[in-house]
Amino acid sequence: MRIVLTGNHAVAYAAFLSRVEVVAAYPITPQTQIVEKLAEFIEGGRLKARYIRVESEHSAMAAIIGASAAGARTFTATASHGLTYMNEMVFWAGNARLPIVMAIVCRALAPPWNIWTEHTDILAQRDTGWIQFFCEDNQEVLDTVIQAFKIAEDNRVLLPVMVGLDAFILSHTATPIDIPEQEDIDRFLPPRKPLPFILDVNNPLTHSNMTYPDQTMEFRYRLQKAMERARRVIVEVDEEYGKLTGRRYGGLLDCYKCEDADLGVIVMGSSAGDAKEAVDKLRDEGYKPGVVRIRVFRPFPKEELKEVCRRFKVIAVIDRDLSPGLGGILYAETLTSLYDLRNRPIVQNCIAGLGGRDIRVEDFKLVIKELYRGVEENIEIPPIKWIGIGDV
Amino acid sequence: MSLKIKDLPIEEYWLPGNPSCHGCPASLGLRLLMKALGPKTIVVIPACCSTIIQGAYPKTSAKFPILNIAFAASAAAASGIVETLEFKCKDNVNVVVWAGDGGTVDIGLQALSGAAERNENIIYVCYDNEAYMNTGIQRSGSTPYGAWTTTTITGKKEHKKDLPLIMAAHRIPYVATASVAYPIDFIAKLRKASKIYGMKYIHLHSPCPTGWRFPSSKTVETGRLAVLTGTWILYEVENGVFKLNPPSNTLIDKNRRKPIRNYIKMQGRFSHLTDKDIDELQRYVDEQWETYLKLLSIGKIY
Amino acid sequence: MEAILETPLSKPSEGSAGITGYWRTFKPVINRSKCMKCLLCWIYCPEGTVIRINDDVDINYTYCKGCGICANECPAKAIDMVSEE
């Protein structure tokens, strides 16, 4: 079935097709249509599930943790301040290894109040033990949320998954989307198994009481190992979903015209589309850039990125986020991945699009051309560049 | 046909040899909780003394499932559990929150209020030892006026937050106060609560030897004196009908209540109280009674 | 991959804090001739170390911490707190 959906509604349809059983969510711009659509599905009887209308995001994640521990397939969605408010419980879900799925509509943090897209909110959660996806378009949003349940519940993984979509650019923009058939998704995604544990009066266990230093570190190690196994599971699930629907996203990385590229643009989220358009236009002019879209930020695709970037002379890392005092977060993680290369490319960090400022095709073209010029004329390439910034 | 001690089940679900202090009311309370409700009970415990008295991984003192959860989150986590159990049609299981006063009256209040407003089918028990005992006796909203704590060295300047009345204002089906000194009353209230659908709130007075500074053998005696001086009032609000329970129902006449001085003298946390402070506490207790007697006279408050 | 190892799940066990009997400085001793079998000591014990067998009581000295509540509450004064020395 092909219908026109906003990114938010695509999320709701995906949760619906995945037969979520308990939803607990609190509204926040620009996520509200996700929870409203799910309420419609549930109250209209189309989706057999419970909707807990919690009084805050912190309680939303706490309720979801309780529900997941009791054995339900669970889902929630939030953005920006909602996400940072529930941060304590996001860590809890990661360490508890519960297969929760959450949609994040990536939005700027205040002050100042700003409802438009920025990645700092979701990236600030990168240490919580959650798998993190960034989507380029609404079709990918729908497909990835469904895949997220399968990945999360895989007994080699057992990690919660957050799926990021850019505020307004994806969440509120309607595009035609293919909705898979329920029977196909039922075969792809069977009911949840009672892992990693379930609260059961017939087998009384206590979850998460005090654990001393001589016992705790092993749990952290196992979480790391689960993240490492997740890299393969993500690729497997992408492949299996691809066989089912014909749509594949490349697993951890979506590489566009990289085979013969000598310059790479590393980017996450919806602006990858503009980057790809810029690359097409520049190839017409004789340049050979490529786009590496990071689809999965956690687990960070270090090996895969190193392999792709091996052939580049110079790289632009586009950060739609800021870690004040360091620079771009994606930039820092990219450098970590490239460290082992004998011939390291030049890497420039481009801070762009913060607070929802538009990143235009023209901006990508300028960045790329500047980098080519820098390499050719042997000019010092500034390590950090702020795109489109006004008088400061 | 009231409950007799002999009729209570022998089986222990809260196991001995746990890390609780000598004379711990939380440990006693958990024993009584399980005697009341039986093993088909899932308990959510936020950060509090009861987190620690479970013991350390890989052992637990509980022969019933416990979901430990973050400090502010217990009522929300319990909501998630009960909604899942109802969804999966496993509804003969009690879902209980066992939280201290900190995780109820202060940091946990938002989640509790939300769960109450949604009338989630849970039994929320606040065991009130009147301070943040687990982190070393710092004051909570539930600490009484004048009490020493590590953050109210010269005594707390504010009166105790009246959580049971706040919960009654949520119009939930059942609100009650109880005390570890009156175990049969507590057990009867828990059993009554387990038969009601919706949000049930029980506030359990829990005298703490370590934090209140009295000998460990006096836990029950202190609790009893709290009731007999009228400082702690045993009552229920069932569907809006306010009712005093024994022995509080015999203390309507002020002269039948023991002077509060008897209760104060037993506790080191009040040792610095002047006569003026004690008078203030007596005044407060008398004022509480005025309020509750007015509620009693209304009959159905909601 | 055993799920029980992936996140901390603890199993029920007596003595989660070890042999708490070692915490005692005084131990409760029941005077059978005075005991009225009212079972108040059993219900008031915070530890569950007053063991009930039918209507008789005994003390589990492995875990009894010697808090003294049983002796304090016994209406027949049938329990003495005796020094461990």
Image (spheres, coloured by chain):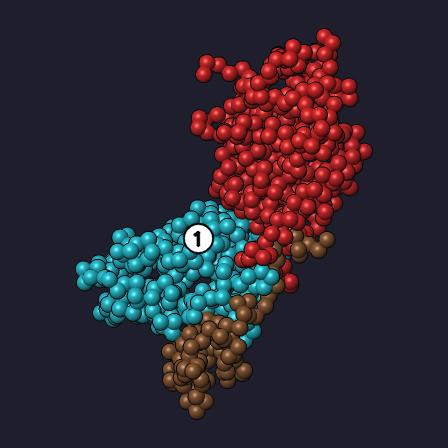
Chain colours: A red, B cyan, C brown
- Nearest the eye: A263 or B121: A263
Q: Is residue C46 left or right of residue B287?
A: right
* Residue A165: quadrant of the picture: top right
Residue A267 locus on image (x, y percent)? 64, 24
Q: Residue at x 56, y 73 (%)?
A: B11
- Relative to residue A384, is residue A159 depicted above or below? below
| Residue A263 in picture, x, y percent from top left | 70, 18
Q: Could you tell me if residue A90 is visible in this image? A: yes
Numbered label tally? 1
Which residue is at the far left?
B276
| B20 on left or right of B253 | right
In the picture, measured across the screen, residue B70 lies left or right of residue A272, that is left
Q: Nearer the viewer, residue B103 or B287?
A: B103
Q: Residue at x 66, y 49 (%)?
A: A222
In this rendering, the answer to whether B222 lies above or below A81 is below
Residue A67: give x, y in percent of width and height. 59, 49
Q: Residue at x 48, y 42 (%)?
A: A55
Going by the numbered disc 1, the residue's amino acid type is: Gly
| Left/right of residue B15 with respect to residue A312 in the rendered view | left
Circle 1 sits in a helix, a strand or a loop, which is it?
helix
Q: Which corner quadrant of the image does residue C36 belong to?
A: bottom left
Which chain is mark 1 on? B
- Against A135, is A193 above or below? below
Residue A332 versus residue C83 in the image, above or below: above
> Percent from the top left, x then y, of residue A346?
65, 21
Outermost residue, bottom direction?
C33
Q: Is residue A144 visible?
A: no
Q: Residue at x 71, y 55 (%)?
A: C2
Instruction: Identify the residue at the far top of this view.
Output: A285
The residue wearing badge 1 is: B103
